Image (cartoon, rainbow, N blue to C red):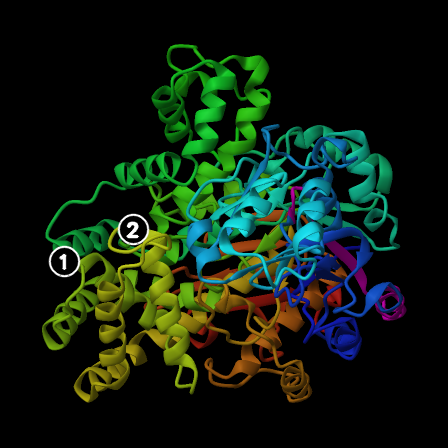
Amino acid sequence: MIVGTYRLQLNRDFNFEKVMGYLDYFRELGVSHLYLSPVLKARPSSSHGYDVVDHTRVSEELGGEEQYRKLIEEARRRSLGVIQDIVPNHMAVHDQNWRLMDLLKKWKESRYYDYFDHYDDDKLILPLLEDDLEKVVAQGKIKVTSDGVEYAGLRFPLNEEGRRYVENRCPDGSCLDHREIMHVISLQNYSLVSWRESPNYRRFFAVNDLIAIRVELDHVFEESHSYILGFPVDGFRIDHVDGLLDPEGYIRRVRERVGNKLIYVEKILQLKEKLPDWEVEGTTGYDFMNYVNLLLVDNMKEMVRIYENFLGKMSNVSEVVKESKRLVANTLFRKDLERLSSLLNVELNYLVDFLVCLRVYRTYTGEEKEIEECDREGRIPRERMKRLQQYMPAIFAKGYEDTALFRYNALISLNEVGSDLSTMSLSMEEFHEFNLKRKPTSLNATSTHDSKFSEDVRARISVLSEIPETWEERVRCWHDLLKPKIDKNDEYRVYQTFVGSYEDSPDYGERLRAHVIKALREAKVHTTWENPNLEYEERAISLVNDMLHDRSFLEDFREFLRMVEEPGYKKSLITIALKMLSPGVPDIYQGTEVWRFLLTDPDNRRPVDFERLSHVMKQLPETLDLEVSDERVKMWFTRKLLRIRRQGLGEYKPLEHGFSRGNVILLFSPRTKKVPRGRVDLKDNYVNLVNGNRTRVAELEELEKYGILVLARREAGNTE
């Protein structure tokens, strides 16, 4: 039985052997399955494993196949299953990707010519250089020998013509001048160009050094999946399923191969969007995260008013989203869309309008209404729709997730993957409706390696919606005090980020500065990754430094923070209680069983001190009487609720102040600054799991302590 999953980010510093050292900790916490990041051989020193270079080898940096098998075996000995993340869509452009190197060397003679999803041009265009080829060669940054072309730690092969040319002149390349180096490179089956240019292959989103593969072809599927699907794990998580040509056919094929093992797909569902009828256990759970986010905010009309008043202008969220999607379509993906335009025999502008119009990451068979609404003149041929559909998620994700979510800042706790900023609140009744329809095996996520903020950051920011007047006063005060020299929209976002993530730790300033630069470049208004405006970025960093060091500001800020910290902790406890007790399977992102204030990737991949967490585990009391800020509180509830899940949960029944699941009742108030008063007749004998007291009546005032009440029917034996 799957009770709960624990997501682990593996890398060379946290490998299979390290994980094995903490298996007893994971078992004691109460999860049933470890959910591992990709384990196949990836680019050297990869921090995440999604940049695979070989589908037929387990990463030696992680410990290799023998250690991987040992981890699976040791986990099973402790009744822990393993769900393995796999990457079917793309591989790294790297010299250790020997299949790609074979293609570069032999081109159409290579058995891997159709392995990679390129456009069948005369050459493969590789946008990997820091500048134009001629400039890079003139600066002596490219070396050519009879063994290949070397640049920035990468090595590309020479075809036979190029190899003969070098060997006839200078085998070690030392005597080749710039003109000769340019000539050798011109002979190759690939073109090395600036990273600012576009490749002629499908990428993962807009990442030039992640080249897509054609997993829809039988031999590509076999070569890329036979090895990893053969391991004795309990299930698989499929990365970026929307990017595949035929996701349904792919899943059917995986299901045939793995039998009744668990299959989860990384499928971003928009609000009220349903998962296609695939034979999977469910998604990775972003829909759940967004429903909880919406439930825990208040006064959103007022928050929008405050935001717009601060900016001094109205802000139409729908237009922000459309402009953002149009921007990435016409810049990052313009070359791809020009090719698609030709393939589909439809004007480029019409195609861009169609993609901007779509309200989901990708359409599927049976969603003709969505397509017809956006293809208003019926110009796009349905028989070629699958190819276009592969690009839909890239346009949507880069336009919405990586642009609009950094541009529209009314309340940034709502700005999450899979959100819909046109919907800014949710009633308890709507949340119940969502839960009642939810697939019971789908994952419930609240923090992930891709979420914009961890659950604790979002919870604290959401408290602002309960004190709009006070928040407006503080923002005006801080603006007058600090006198920032940046766009007010960026300034407003920085204040919220500071409130949500502030920690009195040595590395916080460095982390915050890095995050602010990333947020500004993602927004693509005053600076971008392609063309950084260093002067503007310096002004933003100056604001951050003032916030970190200005005594007057810090005194006022810390006084304000005391108003939001405690209710923020409570909102986070509500979040984990909903995750644990709602229909679905709770997924815990590494380290978030205690308070963890994580920012956008790469900050949310920071290492976890499991040694310290193991020590915290040993200090957990039997009953709970700690300040809500104590990190043991979150771990206590996490472990207690996982144990309740293990004993089994019954039918979901909505209540006015929460819900019941068989013998368990969860009571809470989404508003944590001011909890409701009154009593709830339990109509039976229950035990309050926090203090062990027996009762037939729940006093809602008790929510003031931790924000939640979890009660178990005494006769059910759920009190441990």
- Residue at image point 20% right, 89% down: 551
Part of the protein shown in magenta: 69-91
- Name the image quarter holding the N terminus: bottom right
Q: Give the number of the mark in front: 2 or 1.
A: 2
Q: Which of the marked residues, 2 or 1, is nearer the chain's N terminus?
A: 1
Q: Which amino acid, mark 1?
A: Phe
Q: Residue at x 75, y 68 (%)?
A: 717
Looking at the image, residue 267 lies above or below residue 9: above
Left or right position of 439 against 186: right
User: What residue did someone put label 2 on?
Assistant: 407
Q: Residue at x 35, y 44 (%)?
A: 421
User: How many numbered tags mark residues here?
Assistant: 2
Query: Residue 598 location, x and y as percent?
Result: 47, 69
> Which sits in the foreground, 321 or 91?
91
- Is 466 placed left or right of 430 in the picture? left
Q: For the residue labelled by badge 2, is the local secondary structure a helix, a strand or a loop?
A: loop
Task: Say which quarter of the image contains residue 6.
Answer: bottom right
Q: Nearer the viewer, residue 555 or 192?
A: 192
Real-space Cα separation, disc 2 to disc 1, in angstroms = 15 Å
Looking at the figure, which quarter contains the C terminus? bottom right
Label 2 packing within 10 angstroms: few (<14), some (14-19), many (20+): many
Circle 1 is placed at which residue position?
310
The stretch drawn in magenta includes residue 542: no
513 up-or-down from 294: above or below: below
Q: Where does the image place residue 500, in percent across and percent down from the top left?
A: 36, 70
Q: Nearer the viewer, residue 418 or 197?
A: 197
User: Residue 358 location, x and y as percent?
Assistant: 42, 29
